[in-house]
Structures are given as C-alpha cells and as structure tokens.
Amino acid sequence: MQSAEVKFNRNSLLLTLKRYSSAVSDMEKTILLPSLLRDVPSGCEAADETCRDLYANYLMLKAIRNTVESSLVLLDDHKGKNATFTKTLEPSVDADPEALFLFHLRGLFSVMSDLIKKTRGLTEKYLDIIGLAN
Amino acid sequence: MQSAEVKFNRNSLLLTLKRYSSAVSDMEKTILLPSLLRDVPSGCEAADETCRDLYANYLMLKAIRNTVESSLVLLDDHKGKNATFTKTLEPSVDADPEALFLFHLRGLFSVMSDLIKKTRGLTEKYLDIIGLAN
C-alpha cells in the first residue's frame, strides 16, 4: 500500500505543479542580479528564431509559474502561440474525449518536468556565472 | 478584487477537476441501473467506429473520474490511444515550452468542460429513459 501511495504522490499533477513553483522560487532567491543573464546564450543555435538568451528564459519561467499558481487561463483565447497545436488537434476532439483527456494530462506532466529541469539548470548556470557553482 | 477572485476560482484547474468529479458522483447516485443504458445510442452515427452506446460512455466517464482523482498517469506510457497526438506534437516540444504548457493547460480545461457536459447529459438521458425527466 505504501509503495502505491508513494507512486501516487510522485505522479500527482498538483504536486508536480507545486514542485515547479518551488523550483522557480529557489531560482528567484538565488538569482539576485537577473541582468547578468542578458545575452548569455541558452544552449540553442543563435540562428534558430526561437532561441532566447538566459534572461528571456528566466522571465518565461517566472511567467509560467504565475500561470501555474493562478491556473488562470482564458479558454476563449485560442489565438496566438498555441493556434497551430489547436488546429492540428481540433478534428479529434469529438472523436475520443478520453484519449484527449489523457493526452493533455500526460502532456502537462511532461512539459512541467521539462520546465522543472530548465529552472534548476538556469539556477546552476547563474551560480556558474558568478563563480559560486558547486 | 472580489470579481477577480471569482474569475480565478471559476477558472482554477483544481476546481474544474473537482466539478467533474462531483458531476460523475451525481451520475452514479442517479443511475441505479446502468445496464438500462446498454445499446442506447449516444447520439453519434452507428457507422462511426468510435461511436459507443451510453453504457460505454458511462464506464468511460467513471474511468476518467478515477484518473482525475488519482492523477495517476504513467509518463512512459506513450503507446496506445494518444500515440498519434504525441507524434504530431513531438517536434515542437523543444521549440517553445511556454506554448506547449499553455496548450496542454487550456486543452485540459477544455476537455474537462466537455466531459462535465457529457456527464450531466448522460444523467439527464437516464432520467428520461426511466420516465423521471424534468
């Protein structure tokens, strides 16, 4: 039973969201001078249009944390960044709501895990820049 | 301030998941003889492969509620129903995690709202079948 509970807790969507919130909070406490991250490449190719510097990543991770904490999402806002995704999937919505539910739940878990890693990586990188890396 | 709080509460992911859980609970309390739903068409075309009878829908809505309540999703389970969705999106994962996060958060809100409607609709239909509809 205990093993099942541990598994449950580790996979809980709420806990994953809290873990992310906590990682961003640690990042904010550590990064006292965010401007040091300006123009520091984030590891992607500069020629890549979506490539941002670490400062832009820092702002993005904070913005996502605010959305996570408020869960305030306007459902009718289908314009903008996710328009392509939505368009690709729209025909399937009516076909199988169960598959769509699992798809979004898994997707949210997966993207949150990725964002937790990015947040911790950025915090480490900052410590490296100021010469305090472990 | 109060208006903003109301908006926040209405859109909270947690509350949406709770609303769904509660709708399924009402459905279970109302539908004392689920077998009456067998072979009752669910409104889709019978020729459609994904078309299920209301009994299958009843089971599906309960199964989703169990997943919602446990949030127990195996992240490495990429096989099965959502394989097509995952494949379509995979190339974009690295490109813009913020867009992907918003996409899945909005998607989850949207599919949950749809499932709440389906659950209430199914409960109404059952009452109609046993002659107790309003």
Image (cartoon, coloured by chain):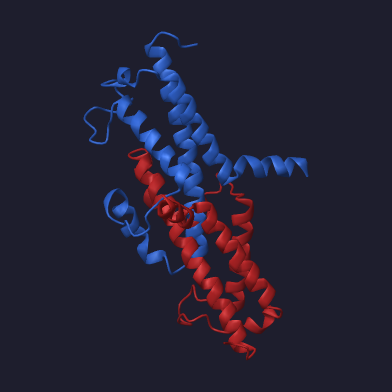
Chain colours: A red, B blue
At 29% from the left edge and 26% from the top edge, which residue is drawn? B53
Question: Looking at the picture, does residue A27 appear above or below residue B97?
Answer: below
**Number of marks present in the image shown:** 0
**Quarter-of-image position of residue A94:** top left
Decide if residue B134 is on the left or right side of residue A129: left
Residue that protrudes farthest toward the bottom in the picture: A131
Decide if residue A22 is on the left or right side of residue B3: left
Residue A105, x across and y down, in percent:
44, 51
Residue that protrudes farthest toward the right in the picture: B1
At 57% from the left edge and 73% from the top edge, which residue is drawn? A57
At 34% from the left edge and 21% from the top edge, which residue is drawn? B34
Residue B12, x across and y down, in percent:
60, 45
At 78% from the left edge and 45% from the top edge, which residue is drawn? B1
Question: Looking at the picture, does residue A88 appear above or below residue A40?
Answer: above
**Quarter-of-image position of residue A127:** bottom right
Decide if residue A131 is on the left or right side of residue A10: right
| Quadrant holding the C terminus of chain A | bottom right
Residue that protrudes farthest toward the top in the picture: B131
Residue B91, x across and y down, in percent:
36, 66
Question: Looking at the picture, does residue B78 appear above or below residue B118?
Answer: below
